[in-house]
């Protein structure tokens, strides 16, 4: 990934689309909290999200005339990537949401760009220079500020789940880089979402529908909003923006996702912002923005269901 070209930055429509995507993904934690308040459990929330999003993305891929017949080996790998890899990450993150504020969970998850860069360096896929080290240090310092200032009372299990989500997401991304090479990004999103839907619907059946039945109408509405706004629309907007501004600018703009989550948490859920969270949040986002600006991330940073999954080496991916 290289620094954005000046000419690309003039496409305001593409930047707006990337911002819409960031806001959509940033809304997931908020809708998740609202669904919990209405009586849905974690399995119910995720079963609704992916069961609704999967056919939407398959339909979008068909309308866009994307190739969905990928062959059994590739198709099974993508379904497994969603049904196992992404399902575990989503389970960790949405369980963290049951214990800690939405903004805090989002900031903990956003440690993953730094972790992916560090992992790519360790695997020999990327080079490390002083500027990249500074960006990584900034992200880590931000997490310390979010968690470490006196007066910040956070649930320890929730924090552990949030950090585990970021760590698992890092492994998922580094493995997914190989599994998704040469696959159309929209087709990959459709397959991965379908795999995740299968896992969570099966889990809901196994537990007898607990966490899915008997909730308030507002909870089901929040679950649908997660699927439509936070998944299908967010993915479609990002892909459209990516085509217009390029991977570096798309990655930079998408780094504002946790900003939207924190802002929505304050406005919608009444979350409070302490000095540690404000300073730490700024540092985390700044570190995520600086990584593509400095050209330190040579490989994609993200996944088929997250805005920073960007094309590299001529491949068509998201």
Image (cartoon, rainbow, N blue to C red):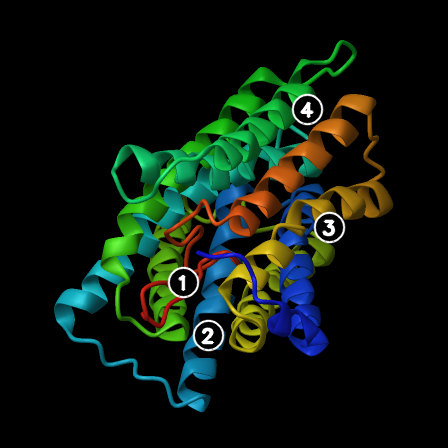
- Residue name at image x 33 percent, y 43 percent: 126
For mark 1, give the secondary structure: helix
The residue mark sitting in front, 4 or 2, is 4
Q: Disc 4, disc 2: CB below 8 Å? A: no
Q: Which residue is mark 4?
A: 146
Q: Which residue is mark 1?
A: 193
Q: Residue furthest left?
A: 73
Q: Disc 3, disc 1: CB below 8 Å? A: no
Depicted 150 relative to depicted 50: above or below: above
Q: Is residue 234 left or right of residue 13?
A: left
Q: Which residue is mark 3?
A: 260
Mark 3 or mark 2: name the one nearer the start of the chain. 2
For mark 2, give the secondary structure: helix
For mark 3, give the secondary structure: helix
In the rendered image, residue 18, in percent from the top left (x then y), is placed at 63, 66
Q: Disc 2, disc 1: CB below 8 Å? A: yes
- Residue name at image x 28 percent, y 62 percent: 180
Depicted 87 relative to depicted 55: above or below: above
């Amino acid at each position: 990934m290289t620094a954005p070209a000046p000419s690309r930055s003039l496409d305001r429509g593409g930047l707006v689309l990337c911002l819409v995507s960031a806001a959509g993904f940033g809304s997931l934690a908020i809708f998740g909290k609202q669904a919990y308040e209405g009586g849905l459990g974690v399995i119910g929330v995720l079963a609704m999200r992916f069961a609704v999003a999967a056919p939407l993305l398959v339909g979008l891929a068909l309308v866009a005339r994307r190739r969905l017949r990928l062959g059994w080996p590739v198709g099974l790998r993508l379904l497994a990537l969603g049904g196992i890899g992404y399902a575990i990450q989503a389970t960790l993150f949405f369980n963290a949401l049951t214990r800690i504020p939405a903004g805090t969970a989002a900031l903990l998850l956003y440690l993953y760009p730094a972790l992916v860069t560090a992992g790519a360096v360790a695997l020999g896929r990327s080079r490390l220079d002083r500027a990249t080290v500074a960006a990584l240090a900034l992200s880590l310092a931000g997490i310390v500020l979010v968690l470490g200032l006196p007066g910040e009372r956070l649930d320890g299990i929730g924090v552990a789940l949030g950090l585990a989500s970021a760590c698992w997401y890092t492994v998922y991304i580094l493995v997914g880089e190989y599994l998704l090479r040469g696959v159309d990004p929209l087709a990959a999103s459709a397959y991965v979402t379908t795999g995740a839907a299968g896992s969570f619907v099966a889990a809901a059946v196994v537990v007898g529908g607990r966490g899915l039945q008997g909730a308030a109408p507002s909870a089901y509405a929040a679950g649908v909003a997660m699927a439509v706004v936070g998944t299908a629309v967010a993915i479609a907007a990002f892909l459209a923006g990516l085509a217009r501004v390029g991977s570096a600018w798309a990655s930079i703009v998408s780094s504002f996702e946790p900003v939207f989550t924190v802002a929505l948490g304050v406005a919608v859920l009444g979350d409070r912002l302490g000095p540690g969270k404000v300073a730490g949040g700024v540092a985390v986002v700044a570190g995520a923005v600086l990584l593509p600006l400095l050209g330190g991330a040579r490989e994609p940073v993200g996944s088929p269901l997250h805005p920073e999954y960007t094309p590299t080496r001529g491949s068509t991916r998201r």
